[in-house]
Amino acid sequence: MVKKAGNVFINTTVNDISTFIELAVRLDGYLFRGQPAKYHCLSTSLERLIGDNLKEQGNVESAILKQFKARAHHFIPHPPDLNDNVEWLALLQHHGGPTRLIDVTESIFIATYFAIMSSQKEDSDACVWGISEDRINNLFEDEYKERQKNSFPVPPDLYTIIQREALQENINGIQNGIGSSKTSVNIAIISPQRVNERMVAQKAKFIAPFELRNPFIRNFSACMMAYTKDDIKADWCEFQDLSNRMNPSIPWSAIRFRIPKDIFPSMLKLLDKMNINEATLFPGLDGFARSLQTLATNSKNINLPQEKKPRTWKYYEELFVRLDEERSGLSARVRPR
């Protein structure tokens, strides 16, 4: 069982890249998700689509999976077994469909890249969530110990197997009209069995809630024994002090790193040196083509005369506006009374 250890969440703001690198080495046992800082909590694509009608989320998921299973064979040569709902959810998530799954990665640097790229589109600071994998695994400790007694040798991925089976049972219960399984555990980490090249490159996993009548963040908080506003309220820590406050034996349930916009260029440059970019995270021609956006937006990589800046579309846009304004003024002056 997870023991409550003070605040579930802790917030900090990254203000030094070298310290960020040093800290990343110590963050064993965490999974990471990057997103714009303007979104203050974690939510799934399905719950955002449903809105206030969360009580119907299970029925909507069942309907979506039914339609997806019925037509997916037109697009993929070897679909999953029809009864393997976990793999179908993972496949649906991979192709951009609405699901209960949240994408996470084992790498804080990959999460940072995704956080910055998505935040640039939103004109927002970035946020990287670090979610304690150990604390979620510990939710299944009793089941793990029970199976450990009867398994020889013990599978190295036993926690993965247990959580996958728990999610499968949960989905089946909803589809069969039984509802969510009665358990105090409402969240699990999922590693799909059918792993594609992109998932390998992104070191991807998923986190899935079980109680679909509640938002994801409530599922997560409840499993971490955070039930009140005071429990959920994040503690604040200066970035330089974070390393000193880390306790590996009692990890925080979640750490939120805010990354200011003004360090995006330096951070992206560092990540590129780590070989973290569109071309590596999205293997194939699509990723390579997307990586060329960096070339187009970085003037240092474009061989243009430096003594005279080229006139871009913005120059002509402003010119046309100015000419239209002058023409309107002239027309007003010569208009007969």
Image: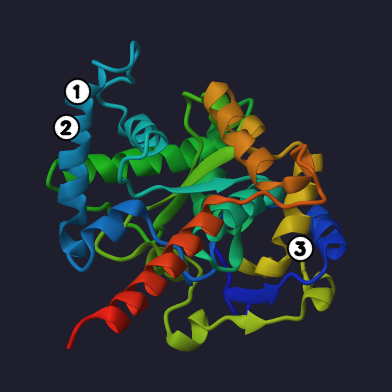
Question: What residue sits right under mark 3 in the picture?
Answer: 248
Q: Nearer the viewer, residue 271 or 210?
A: 271
- 1 vs 3, front mark: 1
271 with respect to 328 (left or right): right
**Element under label 3?**
loop
**Residues at badges 2 and 1 in contact (C-beta under 8 Å)?**
yes
Question: What residue sits right under mark 1 in the picture?
Answer: 71
Q: Is residue 91 above or below residue 250?
A: above
2 with respect to 95 (left or right): right
Query: What type is the residue that disc 3 sits on?
Result: Pro
Mark 1 / mark 3, whichever is N-terminal? 1
Q: Is residue 328 above or below residue 119?
A: below
Mark 3 / mark 2, whichever is N-terminal? 2
Which residue is located at x 82 percent, y 62 percent?
17
Query: What type is the residue that disc 1 sits on?
Result: Arg
Q: Is residue 185 above or below residue 192?
A: below
Name the disc covering residue 67, or none: 2
- Judge the density around disc 3: few (<14), some (14-19), many (≥20) Cα neighbours within 10 Å: few
Please identify the quadrant where the C terminus is shown.
Answer: bottom left
Residue 101 image point, x, y percent: 40, 47
Residue 133 image point, x, y percent: 60, 53
Which residue is located at x 30 percent, y 60 percent?
48
**Residues at badges 1 and 3 in contact (C-beta under 8 Å)?**
no
